Structure formats: C-alpha cells, structure tokens
Image (cartoon, grey):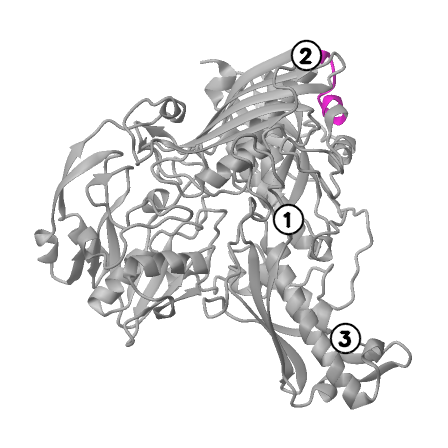
Amino acid sequence: MTTSMQSMVTEVGGIGTSPSRPDAAMKVRGEFAYSSDLWHDDMVWGATLRSPHPYARITGIDSSAALAVPGVYAVLTHADVPGVNRYGLEHPDQPVLAEDVVRYQGEPVALVAADHPETARRAMRRIEVGYEVLDPVTDAEAAVAGAGPDLHPGGNVVRHVPIRRGEQDATADVVVSGCYEVGMQDQAFLGPESGLAVPDDDGGVDLYVATQWLHVDQQQVVAALGLPPEKVRLTLAGVGGAFGGREDISMQVHACLLALYTGKPVKMVYNREESFYGHVHRHPARMYYEHGADRDGRLVYVKARIYLDGGAYASTTAAVSANAATLGIGPYDVPNASVDCWGNYTNNPPCGAMRGFGAVQAAFAYESQMDKLAQACGLDPVEVRLRNAMTEGTVLPTGQVVDSAAPVAELLERVRAMPLPTGPSGELDLRRLPGGVSNTTHGEGVVRGVGYAVGIKNICFSEGFDDYSTARVRLAVVGGEPAATVQTAACEVGQGLVTVLQQIVRTELGVEQVTILPMDTSIGSAGSTSASRQTYVTGGAVRAASLAVRAALVEHAARRLGCLPAELSVAGGKVVSTRDGVLADLADVLGDAVFDETVEWRHRPTETLDPETGQGNAHVQYGFAAHRAVVDVDTELGLVKVVALDCAQDVGKALNPQAVLGQIQGGSAQGLGLAVMEEIQTEGGVIRNPSFTDYLIPTVLDMPPMRIDVLELADPHAPYGVRGVGEPPTISSTPAIVAAIRSATGKALQRVPVRPEHITGT
C-alpha cells in the first residue's frame, strides 16, 4: 500500500494503525456467537408460510390442521397483527402478513410457533391457503409504459428521477450508443436471517437480531405491534454479513408477534432457500445510453434512460433511483446531460440496498460506453477516460460542485502503471487456467485480455436526509487504569467499525483500554450501517464525544495541577504539558472522577433534487476507485479466469490501513461475482436458483491476487479527512473485468453476469 500523505499516529492502537479486531480471535476459532446461535431455555421456534406464487389473490386461509399438530403453540395470520399491518424502510407499503393479495413468490402469509423447528415446519405445511393465480408483471420497462395491472395505488412507478444540464439538443461528431443489462445480484451473506424475541412482564418485548439499522427496525416493529417504543427494545446480535440485505426487516415483526402471543421466547432462523426469499436483492437494470464526443474523444453530451426493477415493494428503490441518475454519467466532466431513471414495481422479488446502491448498475453502462467511444475515436481506453476525467471543482450534472479531491486521472494512471502479470510458464498448473482442475483446457483456445474501469459513489445519506449518529463516551479509572467505554447504536456487521471506534478514542483520550458496549436502542440512533457512512458519521460522533470528554478532563487536570488548560494534553495514559512534558499519570489525575458525554453529530446538510431538472446539492461526499483487470478466456468453452484485479482508490485518510485493504479486496470480489457468475435467475417472477448450489459466488480459487494502491487525499469536510471505502471497489471492478473479456474475445458483452454462451455465441 502506498500513500500520498504521512499517517498521523499519536497512540498505540490509534488512528493510522491496524490493531487486532476485538472479535477476531473468537471468529477464527468459531467461538463468536452469531444471531443464529442465540438460545433461551424456555424458547419455542417460529416458522413462516410463504406464497408459492408471484401474484395471486388469497381466497381463504384454514389453519385448523396446523393447530392440531402436537407441540404447536400458535398459528397467526394478518388478522392477528395488533397494530398496522404494513411496514417499509422508506414507504410502509408491505404487509407484515399478506391479506388479500400476494405480490411476490415467498411473501409471508402465516406464522407458526412450536416446540421444535421441525414441528413448526410440519405444521406450516398443513396450513391451507386458497389462491386465485394472476398474471404477474415482470418487465420493469414495460411497467413504466403501463403494461399490466397496477400493483399498488398510483401505478407501478416508484420514482422517476430526471437530470437535465446544459443543451438538451447538443450534437457531436462521434456518437456511440448501447443497451446494457445487469442481472439481479444477491448479497449472499453467510449468516442467515435470525433472531430471538423475548416477551417481558411489562407487556413489551426484547428482540436480539442481526440487522443494519436498529432504530428503523424498532420504528417498524412498534407500528405493527401497536406498542410504544419504550416497550420494544432491540439489541444487536452477532451479524454474519449484510451488504445491504439486512437494512429492510425480515423476521423482526414475526418473532415479536409470536413471542407476545405465546408468552414465550421465540427463535427464528431462515434456511438458505428461505433467505433468498426473505431479503431484498440488487435491482436488475436495463439501460439505454448515448455518448457524443468530438473527434479527440472529449465528451459533448450523455443521454441515458435507466429502468430499475424494484420488485413487489418499494424498499429503497426511490433512493437507488436517485443514485443511478445522479451518478449516471460516471466520474467525468460532461457539459450536457439528460438522464432519466425509473424505479418500478413488478412481481419479481423485492429489491433494495446492496453495496454500490444504484451506482453499480450505471457504472457497467457508462464504462462500456467509454470503451466504445475509445474504439470509435481510435484512442486507448485509459486515454479517453483521462481526457474526460472530473477533478476537484468539476460541476456535476446536478449542478453540485465537487469540493474535495477527485483524483480520477491519477487513479487510472496508477493502475495502468502497475506491472502486468506474466503468462503461464514452467510446469502446467490447471488452477491458473479457465476451468481450473476440471481439466477443460491445457491452454489451447485461451486468450488473454486487459480492461480498465473507474467509478464514482456518493458517501453517506443524501437528498436532505437528517443523517446523524449518537455516541456516548465515558472515561473513568477501572482497576487502577484509565479506561473508556463507548456506546452507540451503530451496527457492526463484520466491517470492523468496533475497531475503528476504539482507535478514535485511543487517539483523542490517550488511553489504551477502550470497551465498546453492545449496540442497542437504549441510546439514540446511529443510522444505518450502509452508504459507506459509519466511519464518517458514527466515527464523527465518537470523536466529538471524546473531544467533549477531553475538554472536561483537561479543565479538571488544570485545576488539580495548577496549570492553564491550554497548556495540557493527554497521551499514552499521561497528562502532558507543552512547557514541562509529562506531569502525571492520567489515572492519578482522574481519581474518582468520571467524565461522561453524549453527542449527536451530523455531517453538512444536503438538498433534495429538483423534481423537474434534478438540480441540487444532493450528496455529502464522493468516493472514487479504478480497476485494471486481466483475464484469460477459453474462447471455445466460454470459461473465464480472472488473473489479476488491481485497484487504486482514494480513501481520504486510512484510519485502519489493514481494514481498508480488506474492504477493497472484499468489494472487488463482489464485483467479480457480478461480472462472471452471480445472478438470481427468475422466470415469470419465480426464483429458479435459491441455493448456493445454483447461485454461485466467488471462492478463494476465483479471486486473483490484487495489487492495491491507496491514496490518502483528505476531505476537509470530514472527520480526519476520511472518505467512505466499502462501496467504490464494487463499482469499478465489474466493468473492468467485462472490458478485459471483450478485449480477449471481441464480443460486445452488454449484459452481466457474462455467461459462457455470451462468449461462444451458442
């Protein structure tokens, strides 16, 4: 890893270092308790009956046979929901349990509680539901045109986002166009949806659950239960991955309903097939693009129409549509732009948040177009990007000015300068060839290709959303040593936030011992663990609370030591004077004093987009990454081996360099999956491959070595200058790999994932 600025390391385990994660040893030893490991001595098991049809009218439900099964405690339907039978992350349009209509395959219809999971599933299969099957709406573009019935009041368009900048009738010497499609990708987290609901004597319930956003879960649960918030308490359980798929609720309301109805703790755990039905996925997209440029390859205009399939319910489709539209021309300086994005209802599986959040789909299209433009202008693919790369000060199609570093050209130049991998040599190693140990080739018909791509992603929540985090920091002497505790509701989903928060407190308070308390709803919201925002926003809140503690501590120390507060600081467990050096041990100065501060911290405000022109300062910050992919393609069988996937990314400030590298590697792996293997395949709204047997994700054998170049160009508006890290590498990796496959095969390849038949033409 190389950097463009010196790391400021002030404490052992502080920011700029890579201390061990507090949960690392337990996870690698298999001792970490995930939500599916939760247990209560008196608990019963919950199960969910789901619709087998993508679209049908419910004509009746008979649960008598299920209730007669020995060991069954309850069978619940929509009639048993005591509050509002609706929930939704942004719009409450989804029934807790279906009433008269089911709108997607897998929609929950009834719940069962029993003394054993197999008993619950056996009883579930005895529930008789009458269905009048209806013709499903499955084409998002056709839905915009009005084809098919309205699935919700107001029609099948969740949101239309237009972006207009400059001359709408601009012309150009060189014009390239294309239609591009992105399949439905799954987050494929390894830990299935699960949790434990425990009823309380006060008539409320405690829910221990794997999620991304405790307080929004709580809001939706209390509405369905008809209870005040203080009677529904959520605590984060161990999370086995998320990537957006846990931002919407799954079993939260269901487990609480069963617990309150039976008076017993209820555990729910989805199996893998049910998990495919139980959470949202990445929006499939169909995108029409036209790029106009002068003969030197400099862009004159971009026109785009983007159709996103949101599935049966809204989830975050409105926000995903805004991202796809506002980021739809890519990290380029374009004087004239016309972009329209429609997010739509269909009877396909619901889609919502997934790493990249609308920017992934658009990037595949605009980067494919940039390669077409390079070919049309006789330019190198990197050169055409360099000529159009945005910089700090660029005006985006929304009218927003990029007011921090935008090193698009430098990132491209850095990946281009990295050494290329050598070709096969020496003894034949099948693992290095397409098809691997299946022995499909010994090198005959294998062609190498190289491709480049660069992407842009907004960081944090946008469009005027009140994006904040609450943090509490407490400093006291524990066991003779100064120790800090940190409380937030920010969900640790595996990304390493708990480590970063410890690092921030060590840096600001000069103490080594920092404990992160369990995340729950007893403190104010920290927002969602999404949008690459937690280090920025919750990190900002913890820093602000630590600074408040430090200010009070310095005042206290000044009084005890007879100094001016301005002369004092804390570092390494010591109180330090700018004049006299170390004055005292921090523990001695603290004595019995306790400093406790709670802060609600916000980033700078954003604006909603103008509904007619899409103008407005919609985003807080932008992140950039570039990839170079090298692939070997068996052109006879259509098999692809990604040989190298190198990346350069600006992270603002690497608070934890090792964690930064892990995020870049993980994001790139998900981009590789979308490029060549990952897709939920549906037919008539029915999922054909709801298993990890048929839904393929990259393994260690698929992921190539990565050269990673990290830039640290501080954002002056962000705490420590940080820039969100997790999503940008997912955005540029997919188009880079597909560009490399095109380079090897000469095929147009306008859809991902690329399948063997797309390469062989069979």
Q: Earlier in the sequence, mark 3 or mark 1?
A: 3
**Is residue 478 placed above or below 685 in the rendered structure?**
below
Inspect the image, locate mark 1, and give the three-letter code of the amino acid beneath it.
Gly
Residue named by callout 2: 172
- Residue at 18 percent across and 31 percent down: it is 133
Any mark on residue 724, and which? 1
Q: Earlier in the sequence, mark 2 or mark 1?
A: 2
Inspect the image, locate mark 2, and give the three-letter code of the amino acid beneath it.
Ala
Which corner quadrant of the image does residue 299 belong to? top right
Residue 511 seen anywhere in this rendered image of the structure: no
Task: Tell me, yes or no, whether the two marked residues, 2 and 1, touch with CB atoms within 8 Å.
Answer: no
Mark 3 vs mark 2, foreground winner is: 2
Mainly helix, strand or loop, the magenta region? helix
User: In this rendering, would 68 be left or right of 658?
Assistant: left
Task: Tell me, yes or no, whether the two marked residues, 3 and 1, touch with CB atoms within 8 Å.
Answer: no
Any mark on residue 572, and which? 3
Secondary structure of residue under mark 1: loop
Question: Is the residue marked by circle 1 packed among few (<14), some (14-19), or many (20+) residues within 10 Å?
Answer: many
Any mark on residue 41, and which? none
Please state the extent of the stretch shown in magenta in the rendering.
Answer: 375-386
Secondary structure of residue under mark 3: loop
Secondary structure of residue under mark 2: loop
